[in-house]
Amino acid sequence: MSEAQKAPTLAKFASPVDRFHLEMEPLKDAGTKVAGIYCVFAPLELVRAAGAVPVGLCGKKQGPIPDAERVLPANLCPLIKASYGYALTNSCPYWAASDFILGETTCDGKKKMFEIMARLKPLHMMRLPTDTSAEARALWLAEMHRLADYLTAQTGIAVTDEALRREISIQNRIRTALLDLAACAAEPQPPISSLDLMGVFESRTFVLNQEGYLADLLALRAELRELSAKGVSPYKKGAPRILLTGSPIGRGSEKVVRLLEDAGAVVVALENCTGIKSVVGLVEEGGDPMAALAARYLATPCSCMSPNTGRFALIDDLARQFKPTGVIDLVWQACHTYNVESFDLGRHVTEKLELPYLKVETDYTESDMEQLRTRIEAFLELQAK
Ligand code: SF4
Ligand code: SF4
């Protein structure tokens, strides 16, 4: 598929940093505070209702990892090391623009890293429970109120139910639009490449004007419908269809998606938290907005949860909708939670879903590219038989 054949609106998602700077300038002039975030447990609606803007921080490239390893152990997940390395070297434009950071007590490596990161910028830590019981929900709701107080102290703006409801409404519409876009990949020959779709999802936390982002998503969906009607697709008929799950990926750490594309396979569903996991499940509208927000975010099926049954249920739903021919489980080296969960996931995929399963454990470097290519090609070949 040539660039000229692609949906025109895709160009709007191609340079997120430029778009960020353009949108940031008037907000900074108006004194708007920027909250740097790292994880999909960070409640975007609450940040915005307090008059701040949330922005996703860099952590997906190998570049700053050697600097991070001067402080952090080398045997740590690359996402944690890259996040800290960008902060330490002040080389992430979103970090530079952030007035304060939101962290969560997710995996052990990340929460301990946040303790050290707090020496670089003010950092508020949300204490995340590990299940969705009534007690855990009460604790998480209290954490939402504690965050609201922190945000108000930063911005001088009190969080009202009205503002929360407004922000919930726009984020729900964005989630719905992204899920609708993701649904394109359920088509036998999707009109958008997996890498382009990943970029659109990832842009969500870099774009400050959320109404503008939503309008772009809707325009893109309309263009993709037209491309589908004309039979335009970057994929050949009968291409292997992969459901990709596991640790988060993004621009800079997309090597497995790239290898799959090179081999002619479609990533029909990116289950991880840079993909569908970040948008599945709407916040209930109409009741107590803070309680609804807390319930929705706590239901995120991350491997930090114990048990994490939501991930298996989500994968079942995605398998039904997207009809993958195989499942690849990507685990970053030293990501213990996803690594341990792979045992049950592999059995679930092969025994319940009766699909081929491949676990890939790697890091951000390119040193194992050829070895990965061989394994992925062999996995895809198996499905063709
Ligand atoms: S995998 Fe879990 S802890 Fe890591 S960014 Fe996603 S939701 Fe947050
Ligand atoms: S990929 Fe795993 S180890 Fe790394 S931050 Fe996420 S949960 Fe933690």
Image: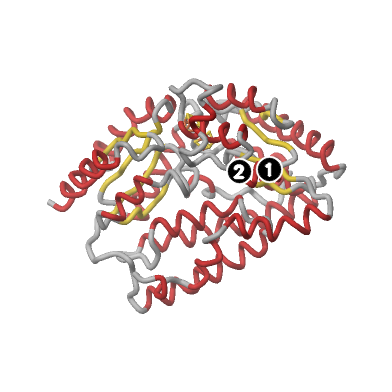
What is the x, y in percent for residue 306? 48, 25
Q: Is residue 220 above or below residue 103?
A: below
Q: How is the image coloured?
A: secondary structure
Residue found 64% across the figure and 38% down from its top: 90
What is the x, y in percent for residue 373? 25, 44
- Furthest-left residue in view? 385
Disc 1 marks a residue whose amino acid type is: Ala
Q: Is residue 271 above or below residue 217?
A: above
Residue found 77% across the figure and 37% down from its top: 148
Q: Residues within 10 Å of mark 2 (few under 14, many from 20)?
A: some
* SS for dot 2: loop
- Furthest-bottom residue in view? 230
Image marks 2 and 1: residues in contact by CB distance under 8 Å: yes
Q: Nearer the viewer, residue 322 or 105?
A: 105
* SS for dot 1: helix
264 sits left or right of 12 in the view: left
Q: Which residue is mark 1?
A: 96
The mark found on residue 342 in the picture is: none
Q: Nearer the viewer, residue 190 or 234?
A: 234
Q: Residues within 10 Å of mark 1 (few under 14, many from 20)?
A: some
What is the x, y in percent for residue 202? 52, 51
How many numbered marks appear? 2
Q: Quadrant of residue 117?
A: top right
Q: Which residue is mark 2?
A: 92
Disc 2 marks a residue whose amino acid type is: Cys
Q: Nearer the viewer, residue 385 or 64?
A: 64
- Whether the residue under disc 1 has CB within 8 Å of ligand 1: no
Residue found 63% across the figure and 23% down from its top: 116
